[in-house]
């Protein structure tokens, strides 16, 4: 049932109306950030359409069909998996998924989807095909999908999931009804983490704010690693605002660019940006409840007193600029030195 899913009440209302009117489109495009529950909503819709004893128009979560669809995990493709060019089927024979392999969705699974979509349901009332990270479709697989979208069978439904709808062909977008998902409120993420995952409230609160509206991101975040990165970046802010120690800034830049920590570089920049945003927020007079790293509120308040809001806003822009430059070949050590020295300027 949709009520058990966190957030996005408007999406729930839209899907319920479709079910009540018996007008679920043959192709839906679920758009929203990663980890906000798009796949869970797709599975819930599949349960509602295949429930053996539907409560109203939603799934009952009790019958064999609902339970098997609910257990769908869709394992990642393995490099040695002979089925990596095939649809991944759930425990329910009418629910399958196509997902990227090595960063792209290839043509073979889309051709299989075209064939399978023309078959009548094996055991339920409708077949559901979920295309994860649909923005990874290449030219060949996009054209294969278009053939299915042009004349979708009445008993088959395609649900495309993406965080980058602009990467899809306009002809694909035009043949789908778009459902937009919003990031969840921090309180909604925290409630899910404490109630469903039994995570202690203090940790759940920090995870919920760090995750920026994504349950998936919250669950994949290692708090110990995050705190280690955050503490290192807090030293940057202390050097900038409290001690004026530029030599310390350059030593931190050296540590960040240690070859052993290359995978930590971008996460540390992200942690630094979050800290600066908290300082900026506090400097504008917002309560501590509105910051991400509220467990550091006293230290961040001390820094915010010494950092004018316009300076903090400039820091955020400079960090964002460097993060954008990482998409191209940039000398990270030189760029980090330049960032910290620029931030040190009044």
Image: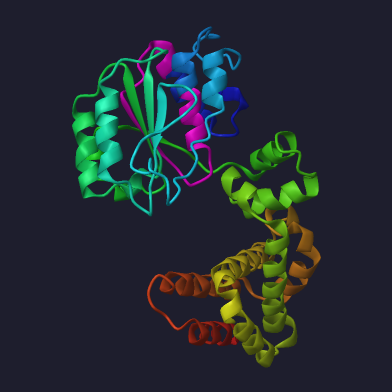
Specify the quadrant that holds the C terminus: bottom right
Q: Residue at coordinates 38% horizontally, 47% vertically from top-left?
A: 100
> Measuring 32% from the left and 46% from the top, which residue is drawn there?
105
Q: Does the magenta-highlighted stretch encompass residue 36?
A: yes
Specify whether residue 173 is in view: no
Number of numbered callouts drawn: 0
The residue closer to the viewer here, 19 or 14, is: 19
Give the residue drawn at x 49%, y 81%: 332
Residue at screen point 55% across, 14% down: 64
Q: Quadrant of residue 265?
A: bottom right
Q: Is residue 150 left or right of residue 119?
A: left
For residue 16, say whether it is visible.
yes
Residue 239 vs residue 268, the one in the foreground: 268
Image check: 198 left or right of 167?
right
Where is 15 relative to 79, above or below? above
Q: Nearer the viewer, residue 87 or 324?
A: 87
Q: Is residue 234 left or right of residue 57?
A: right
Q: Nearer the viewer, residue 330 or 341?
A: 330
Q: Is residue 220 magenta?
A: no
Query: Can you say whether 129 is above or below 36 in the image?
Result: above
In terms of image quadrants, where is residue 230? bottom right
Where on the picture, by quarter, is residue 194? top right
The residue positioned farthest toward the bottom in the image shown: 247
> What span is in magenta?
18-45
Figure colour scheme: rainbow
Image: 282 above or below 182: below
Residue 137 pos. (x, y %): 30, 46
Q: Quadrant of the N terminus?
A: top right
Locate residue 261, reporting x and y percent: 60, 75
- Residue 340 percent across, percent down from the top left: 58, 83
Residue 154, percent from left and from top: 28, 16
């Amino acid at each position: 049932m949709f009520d058990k899913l966190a957030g996005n009440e408007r999406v729930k209302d839209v899907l319920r109306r479709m079910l009540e009117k018996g007008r679920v489109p043959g192709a839906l495009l679920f758009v929203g950030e990663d980890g906000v529950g798009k796949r869970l909503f797709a599975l819930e819709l599949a349960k509602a359409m295949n429930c053996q004893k539907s409560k109203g128009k939603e799934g009952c979560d009790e019958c064999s069909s609902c339970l098997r669809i609910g257990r769908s995990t869709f394992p990642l493709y393995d490099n040695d998996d002979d089925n990596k060019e095939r649809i991944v089927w759930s425990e329910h024979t009418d629910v399958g998924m196509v997902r990227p392999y090595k960063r792209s969705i290839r043509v073979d699974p889309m051709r299989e989807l075209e064939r399978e979509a023309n078959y009548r349901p094996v055991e339920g009332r409708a077949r559901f095909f979920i295309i994860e990270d649909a923005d990874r479709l290449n030219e060949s697989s996009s054209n294969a999908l278009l053939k299915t979208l042009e004349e979708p069978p009445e008993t088959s439904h395609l649900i495309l999931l993406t965080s980058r709808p602009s990467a899809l062909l306009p002809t694909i977008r035009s043949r789908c009804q778009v459902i937009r998902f919003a990031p969840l409120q921090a309180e909604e993420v925290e409630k899910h983490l404490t109630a469903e995952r039994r995570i202690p409230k203090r940790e759940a609160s920090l995870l919920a704010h760090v995750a920026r509206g994504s349950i998936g991101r919250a669950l994949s975040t290692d708090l110990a690693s995050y705190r280690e990165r955050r503490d290192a970046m807090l030293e940057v802010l202390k050097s900038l605002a409290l001690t004026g120690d530029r030599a310390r800034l350059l030593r931190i830049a050296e540590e960040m660019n240690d070859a052993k920590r290359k995978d930590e570089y971008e996460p540390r920049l992200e942690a630094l940006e979050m800290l600066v945003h908290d300082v900026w927020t506090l400097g504008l007079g917002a309560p501590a409840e509105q910051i991400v790293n509220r467990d550091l509120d006293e230290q961040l308040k001390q820094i915010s007193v010494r950092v004018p809001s316009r300076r903090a806003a400039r820091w955020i822009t400079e960090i964002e600029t460097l993060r954008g430059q990482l998409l191209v070949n940039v000398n990270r050590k030189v760029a980090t030195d330049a960032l910290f020295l620029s931030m040190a300027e009044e």
